[in-house]
Amino acid sequence: MKQVHIIGGGLAGSECAWQLAKRGYNVKIYEMRGVEKTAVHKTDKLAELVCSNSFRGTDESRNAVANLHRELRQLDSLIMKSADTNAVPAGGALAMDRELFADQITQTLTQMPNVEIIRGEVTELPQTDEPIIVATGPLTSSKLAAEIEKLTGKERISFFDAVAPIVDASTIDMSKAWFQSRYDKGEGTDYLNCPMTKEQYYSFINAIKEAEQAQAHNPEDAEVPYFEACLPIEVMIERGDETLRFGPLKPVGLTCPHMDEKPYAVVQLRKENKLGTMYNMVGFQTRMKWGDQKRIFATIPGLEEAEIVRFGVLHKNTFINSPELLNADLTLKGHANIRFAGQVSGVEGYVESTAMGCLAGLITAAELAGESFVLPPNTTMLGALITHITGGADAKTFQPMNVNFSLLPPMLEVHKKQRKEAYCARAQESFKAWLTENNMLIKTEEVA
Ligand SMILES: Cc1cc2nc3c(=O)[nH]c(=O)nc-3n(C[C@H](O)[C@H](O)[C@H](O)COP(=O)(O)OP(=O)(O)OC[C@H]3O[C@@H](n4cnc5c(N)ncnc54)[C@H](O)[C@@H]3O)c2cc1C
């Protein structure tokens, strides 16, 4: 019987193993916990949740992640099954008892006769033509990270990252912001600019000084120096109130069409994806707590109502530059038997990592059966995520991404107030059509 090697028994690896094993394939899961530790995991259980115990919102009528839950459930996801079985009351969120959640997944996979769990750190990938799925997550061990660097030809895939927030372009107030590149360079309109008066600038700086900052999970992480070119804004402000104004917020080479006087400072945002639905706040790497980011960034003229689709964060993260390195079927370019899944493949979050594990499993299963696999369309949450990491995102500024509506083809014809519902309704319709056209449900049940 055909054999698949899955490196990493986290959320992505466990989901991937389940999708393959239930279709009759032999799976080896290589998991180092139990022998080696990570800086954050506490147990040796498969699919341990490292931080919060929440899969976020449940409102399928207007919430992107809830629709990802739904799509995964329709694909008979083990992770979703365990989340639902072990759910605890959490208002509008899907939260679970993390011990019972991981126990159920560990037991299910351990009891499957065609799943073997091998404990120990993988330091190089198995020398085989059989399918390999790398799902070692944000805390991939450094030896394996070095191997992946060699394989991909990249100098570095682990970062102590200070990531800038990304906002939904359709929520920026264009009566205050404007398009212009500094000195009209490039296309002349590559940046979105938000002007600040002197008063607004100083109250912004003071608010940041008073904001609460997230602490490093691993004490060693606190010692790691920042890249000088990628300093968190808090660190820049520690060097002086005017540092930002002479750095990323300098008001030169720009003419604001909405103000008579020259702005005292200008916040610039740059396109994050090809669709132009998301913009990255240039130079705004931050370790402020999310609530403070939301409150303080809403004081920037033009961003009062802006929806932050990815908050700035500071943590160790290991991921490949997937838009550059992966094919549409998650295989590494030039290595037809190696796939990446989970957070290391360039998504962010528990559910998103599960989603990529699920797709990697389904695609590999189809390949082993000699069938072609049609990806879900980019109007669905699964389709939008895989499209984003395998080419939709700009490889130059690529950062792992949570599922959100800006990943979907825009529906600007629908009024802003009804847009979330419209995205959800379209995703539901197109996922249903994809399941039917590709006989997905029948296949799942036939082999269960
Ligand atoms: C500090 C921190 C906090 C986070 N908080 C949240 C949160 O609150 N909510 C959220 O949605 N997401 C959070 N994330 C992101 C979250 O961890 C990931 O999205 C999710 O766990 C990724 O799933 P995964 O399967 O890709 O990786 P993981 O779940 O991390 O699984 C990877 C597995 O690979 C194993 N492994 C690594 N290297 C090797 C090796 N060389 N050999 C064998 N095994 C190996 C690891 O032990 C691990 O079990 C957080 C991440 C970090 C680092």
Image (cartoon, rainbow, N blue to C red):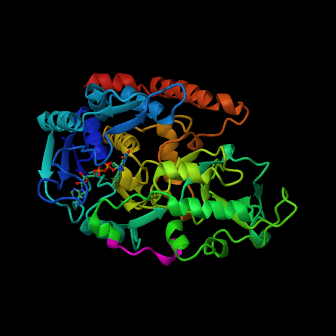
Picture residue at 82% right of the left edge, 61% below the top:
256
**The quadrant where residue 373 appears:** top left
Quarter of the figure that contains the N terminus: top left
Confirm whether residue 170 shows in the render.
Answer: yes
Q: Which residues are magenta?
A: 223-232
User: Magenta stretch containing residue 226, yes or no?
Assistant: yes
**The quadrant where residue 221 appears:** bottom left
Residue, far right: 260
**The quadrant where residue 71 appears:** top left
User: Magenta stretch containing residue 14, yes or no?
Assistant: no
Determine whether 66 is above or below 138 in the image: above
What secondary structure prevails in the magenta region? Answer: loop
Confirm whether residue 395 shows in the render.
Answer: no
Horizontal side of residue 29 vs 203, given as left or right = left
Percent x, y of residue 380: 52, 34
Quarter of the figure that contains the C terminus: top left
Percent x, y of residue 378: 55, 39
Horizontal side of residue 150 vs 37, given as left or right = right
